[in-house]
Amino acid sequence: MEWSTAGRALPGQDVSGDRALVLDTGAGVLFAVLDGLGHGAPAAEAADRATVILTENCGEPLDVLMVLCHRAMVETRGAAVSLALIEPGETLQWLGVGNVDSRLLTLGPAGPELRATMLLTGGIVGYRLPSHLQPQTLPIRPGDLLLMATDGIVAVGPESLDLAKPATAIAGDLLARDAKDTDDALVLAARFRGPCP
């Protein structure tokens, strides 16, 4: 995997409520993007609680991780949470509650193409968790790019991305070009290079 994150706090704030995590689960790589409700210290507290839970329990299934995050954030503002697990066998599992946008992109004959978009479930982790949490599973191919962004980033189409660039440049360019001035913002870009030999 080649991955990078880029983020910043709401202009005028010292701390961001948006967080990204990349964790080796022993059976794959877990990517998590969290957007604490609102901004500032209360949003950061919610995201930090979930970060601890994910780090300590990263080997659990995605739906279990979501429930554990929910329990940890009950006395906070809560957060939008999206989780993506890339597993051996070239599969991607993902699950999202709230509005962290996640997409799988590939380079097609005519340029970048959208392969899949995470189906998000309404709710706020820590406040109102949906009763049915069902991760989606899809194949992933070498060269595919996983792109996850909080709602502080203006949604962009695949045609505006240069998939030939490294993940660091893709995440940095999106933050610089498409971050809103009214919220914290964070982008995670991860390229699947292929299974380990």
Image: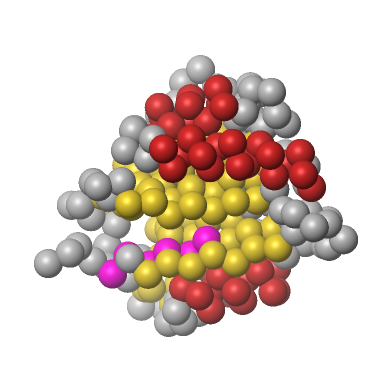
Residue 145 position by quadrant? bottom left
- State yes or no: residue 30 in magenta: no
Residue 35 as seen in the image, left or right of residue 161? right
SS majority, magenta: strand
* As drawn, 113 above or below 98: below
Whole-percent x and y of residue 158? 53, 68
Which residue extends farthest left? 197
How many marks are shown on the rendered structure? 0
Residue 117 as seen in the image, left or right of residue 24? right
Identify the residue at horizontal 49%, vertical 68% (top origin).
4
Which residue extends farthest bottom? 164
Quick one: 49 or 97, which is closer to the camera? 49
Whole-percent x and y of residue 56? 41, 38
- State yes or no: residue 192 in magenta: yes
Identify the residue at horizontal 62%, vertical 28% (top origin).
73
Whole-percent x and y of residue 12? 87, 61
Residue 164 position by quadrant? bottom left
Region in magenta: 188-193
Identify the residue at horizontal 62%, vertical 41% (top origin).
47
* As drawn, 74 above or below 179: above
Residue 99 visible within the image = no
Q: Quadrant of the N terminus?
A: bottom left
Whole-percent x and y of residue 79? 64, 37
Residue 39 as seen in the image, left or right of residue 144? right
- Colour scheme shown: secondary structure
Quick one: 163 or 191, which is closer to the camera? 191
Which residue extends farthest top? 131
Residue 75 visible within the image = yes
Quick one: 15 or 30, which is closer to the camera? 15
Identify the residue at horizontal 40%, vertical 27% (top origin).
64
Q: Quadrant of the C terminus?
A: bottom left
Residue 185 as seen in the image, left or right of residue 136? right
